[in-house]
Image (cartoon, rainbow, N blue to C red):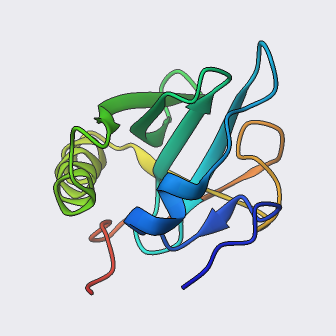
Amino acid sequence: MSHNPGNKTFPFSATAIDALPPAAAGRRDEYCDTRCPGLVLRVTSTGAKSFSVVTWNPKRKTPERKALGFWPKVALDEVRRRARIAAHFRAARGARILIPTTFVASIMSTGFTQVLPGRPGCLPG
């Protein structure tokens, strides 16, 4: 599946991740995986790509980010596995996975929607 560079939310694949351009000088772009709620790929102006999972801490009332690894050093399947584990661990402590309220805006510049309690994690396939 090809990726439209203007869309910040899409199903991550090796081809789509490799095709992402570096962010503008001094900035970081963030992309969300549609197959794994809370999984975020951050791309720096130097082209470095790192994964994290973003959750909501209800006690602090702030988002929290857990680093999961760098692309391509960590495979996409492994990153999704790590995201699932981190989401379950944080959900057990009352955290909620955050997803963007729109598909085309960066998660750091838009509102968030909390995933309700249950079994957070990545979609199969």
Q: Position of residue 104 (x, y in %)?
A: 82, 63
**The one of 21 and 113 positioned closer to us in this rendering:** 21
Q: Residue at x 20, y 63 (%)?
A: 77
Q: How many marks?
A: 0
Q: Quadrant of residue 45?
A: top right
Q: Residue at x 73, y 36 (%)?
A: 108
Residue 41 vertical position relative to residue 62 in the rendered view, above or below? below
Q: Residue at x 40, y 40 (%)?
A: 51
**The one of 64 and 80 positioned closer to us in this rendering:** 80
| Relative horizontal placement of residue 115, taking residue 102 as reference (left or right) | left
Q: Residue furthest top?
A: 26
**The one of 13 and 98 positioned closer to us in this rendering:** 13
Q: Is residue 116 visible?
A: no
Q: Is residue 53 visible?
A: yes
Q: Residue at x 57, y 30 (%)?
A: 47
Q: Position of residue 43 (x, y in %)?
A: 58, 34
Q: Quadrant of residue 29?
A: top right
Residue 117 vertical position relative to residue 95 in the rendered view, above or below? below
**Image quadrant in which the N terminus is located:** bottom right
| Relative horizontal placement of residue 74, taking residue 9 as reference (left or right) | left
**Image quadrant in which the C terminus is located:** bottom left
Residue 47 vertical position relative to residue 106 in the rendered view, above or below? above
